[in-house]
Image: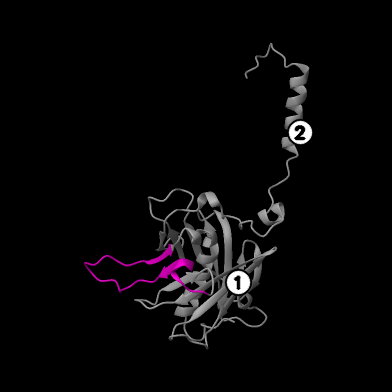
């Protein structure tokens, strides 16, 4: 409805309009789903049923030169805008030059902060840490490795991050194949039906006349409910797997 300067609202309309404005002005800020719904079924921030795809999506890890020490994890061009790329940067800790902080953002370099983790040659005064969805904890509490226990000569890891009254737990395991890919499962029962994602390192070195092979992350529809945890844990595990032996055990 359009009201000209010469017209006036009826008294009851004016009251209703004023009440609406007052309510809008006093609307509370958004709260975390777990606090709002008082339940354990609320999805973490950034996770929505609406955004869950119906097929597997393969993200490509593309190193960047601007800014330096950075990478973008990008979904295919045909994917809708709900699957946003991850922007990842690495910076040195100025107080501990042997320790490095990896920061993960969604959508752009200045986008939503997903979290960060710090690893390197640290000490008991400055242990390796992870911070996901605003909650920081020692890396040793969030990632458990069977570094000394092998099954078919392949390592496995358990990622366990607590938030409010909910704990997110996923399981990674090295699987046979070029570059030793990693497979992420939703439970200790590591069967095809429980696969959340696969982290796929390059299968062969670069060679003239052959297309380069990028690191990829294939995520299932169900896996997108845990996409932030999958991205961060994959980065940390691959960092551990490929680091020199002195850096390989940050906890």
Residue 88 image point, x, y percent? 49, 63
Taking 155 as reference, is 200 left or right?
left
Of the 4 image quadrants, the one containing the C terminus is bottom right
Magenta-highlighted residues: 189-218
Of the 4 image quadrants, the one containing the N terminus is top right
Numbered circles on residues, count: 2
> Quick check: can you spot residue 93?
no
- Mark sitting on residue 22: 2
Looking at the picture, does residue 87 appear above or below residue 198?
above
Mark 1, secondary structure of its residue? strand
Mark 2, secondary structure of its residue? helix
Q: Label 1, on which residue? A: 160
Looking at the image, tell me whether mark 1 or mark 2 is earlier in sequence order: 2
Q: Tag 1: Cα neighbours inside 10 Å, few (<14), some, or many (≥20)?
A: some
Residue 161 image point, x, y percent? 62, 69
* Residue at 75% from the left image edge and 39% from the top image edge: 26
């Amino acid at each position: 409805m359009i009201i000209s300067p010469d017209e006036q609202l009826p008294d009851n309309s004016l009251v209703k309009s004023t009440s609406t404005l007052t309510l809008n002005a006093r609307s509370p800020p958004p709260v975390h789903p777990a606090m709002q719904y008082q339940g354990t079924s609320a999805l973490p921030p950034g996770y929505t049923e609406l955004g869950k795809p119906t097929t597997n999506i393969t993200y490509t890890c593309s190193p960047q030169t601007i800014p330096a020490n950075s990478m973008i994890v990008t979904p295919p061009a045909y994917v809708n805008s709900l699957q946003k790329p991850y922007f990842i940067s690495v910076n040195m800790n100025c107080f501990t030059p042997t320790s490095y902080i990896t920061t993960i953002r969604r959508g752009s370099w200045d986008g939503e902060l997903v979290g960060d983790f710090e690893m390197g040659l640290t000490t008991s005064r400055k242990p390796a840490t992870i911070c996901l969805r605003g909650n920081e904890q020692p890396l040793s509490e969030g990632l458990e490795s069977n570094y000394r226990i092998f099954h078919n000569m392949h390592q496995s890891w358990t990622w366990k991050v607590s938030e409010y009254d909910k704990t997110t737990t996923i399981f990674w395991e090295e699987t046979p194949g070029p570059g030793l890919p990693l497979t992420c499962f939703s439970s200790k029962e590591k069967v095809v039906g429980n696969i959340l994602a696969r982290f796929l390192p390059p299968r062969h070195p670069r060679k003239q006349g052959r297309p380069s092979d990028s690191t990829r992350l294939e995520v299932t529809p169900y896996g997108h409910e845990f996409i932030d945890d999958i991205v961060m844990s994959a980065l940390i595990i691959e960092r551990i797997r490929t680091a020199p032996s002195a850096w390989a055990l940050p906890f």
